């Protein structure tokens, strides 16, 4: 089972349709796909802290409702802001007590971030998405330090699961430095984390089933699923 989480800087105008192509590609590999949705920030979105986290946790835990699934072989895979949520969803056993969406009913065995916003404090420093992180969590880290500690994968390290971070080197939306710095911190904390830079790939290439970037990502996804046996 691959849990797919779309991006779009957590904003309401972006939906899970962004991952429709990857859903088909995942199924074409013979895997099951679970393309999830969540409340987002903006008009009629109702998302951000805490709703988005409650939704993502509930979406992953809902897999318990399908008795034919092998819950021991679940990997989360998200793009951009969805990369943040994919790592967070697989790290819910690490979040502080009382955090929305935790504790986990279903624990993924690994996680993949495709051009992921995996360090929320760094995202604020970089000014990603014209203030998207601050809008998502309701303010900057100095105003809501407890939210950033509970919400950012970088603050939750070590996650205790294998992680792969695929990032195009031509990405101007989320700089590849985000994944590179996170991977170094994860390894230093004792995690099994791999950074996979993809030459000439931009932000959307990693979710294009016809791209070389997705071909590379899918090979690593296959390895993560095989290791979960």
Image (cartoon, rainbow, N blue to C red):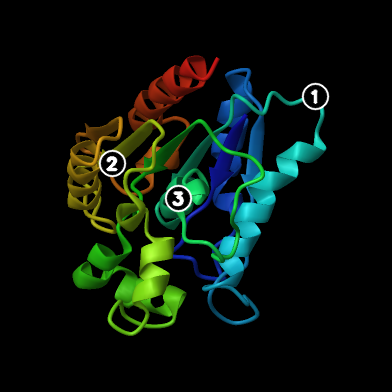
What residue did someone put label 2 on?
167
Residue 83 shows up from this direction: yes
Q: Check if mark 2's residue and mark 1's residue have beta carbons within 8 Å.
A: no
Q: CA distance from mark 3 to mark 2?
A: 25 Å
- Residue sitting at 51 percent across and 30 percent down? 109
Q: CA distance from mark 3 to mark 1?
A: 28 Å
| Secondary element type, mark 2 | strand
Of the image marks 3 and 1, the number of the one nearer the N terminus: 1
State the image coordinates of residue 174 (x, y, percent, origin top left). 28, 56
User: Which is closer to the viewer, label 3 or label 1?
Assistant: 3
Residue 162: which quarter of the image? top left
Residue 42, above or below 111 = below
What residue did someone put label 1 on?
68
Of the image marks 3 and 2, the number of the one nearer the N terminus: 3
User: Which is closer to the viewer, label 2 or label 1?
Assistant: 1
Residue 150: which quarter of the image? bottom left
State the image coordinates of residue 146 (x, y, percent, origin top left). 39, 73
What residue did someone put label 3 on?
94
Estimate how packed mark 2 is, as few (under 14), some (14 to 19) or many (20 or more) residues with alpha carbons within 10 Å. many
| Secondary element type, mark 1 | loop
- Residue sitting at 52 percent across and 20 percent down? 228
Of the image marks 2 and 1, the number of the one nearer the N terminus: 1
Q: CA distance from mark 2 to mark 1?
A: 34 Å
Residue sitting nearer the eye, 122 or 78: 122
Estimate how packed mark 3 is, as few (under 14), some (14 to 19) or many (20 or more) residues with alpha carbons within 10 Å. some
Estimate how packed mark 1 is, as few (under 14), some (14 to 19) or many (20 or more) residues with alpha carbons within 10 Å. few
Which quadrant: the C terminus?
A: top right
- Left or right relative to 168: residue 222: right
Residue sitting nearer the eye, 75 or 145: 145
Residue 219, above or below 171 = above
């Amino acid at each position: 089972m691959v849990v797919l989480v779309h991006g779009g800087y957590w904003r309401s105008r972006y939906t899970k349709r962004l991952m429709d192509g990857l859903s088909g590609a995942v199924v074409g590999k013979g895997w099951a796909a679970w393309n999830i949705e969540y409340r987002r920030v903006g008009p009629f979105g109702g998302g951000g802290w805490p709703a988005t986290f409650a939704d993502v946790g509930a979406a992953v835990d809902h897999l318990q409702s399908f008795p034919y699934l092998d819950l021991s072989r679940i990997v989360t895979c998200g793009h951009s802001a969805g990369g943040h949520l994919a790592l967070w969803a697989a790290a819910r056993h690490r979040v502080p007590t009382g955090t929305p969406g935790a504790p986990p009913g279903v624990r993924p065995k690994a996680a993949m971030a495709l051009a992921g916003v995996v360090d929320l404090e760094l995202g604020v420093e970089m000014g990603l998405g014209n203030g998207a992180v601050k809008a998502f969590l309701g303010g900057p880290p100095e105003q809501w330090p407890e939210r950033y500690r509970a919400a950012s994968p970088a603050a939750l390290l070590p996650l205790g699961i294998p992680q792969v971070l695929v990032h195009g080197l031509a990405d101007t939306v989320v700089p590849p430095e985000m994944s590179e710095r996170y991977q170094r911190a994860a390894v230093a904390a004792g995690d099994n984390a791999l950074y996979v830079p993809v030459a000439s790939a931009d932000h959307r290439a990693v979710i294009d089933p016809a791209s070389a970037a997705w071909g590379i990502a899918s090979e690593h996804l296959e390895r993560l699923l095989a290791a979960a046996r």
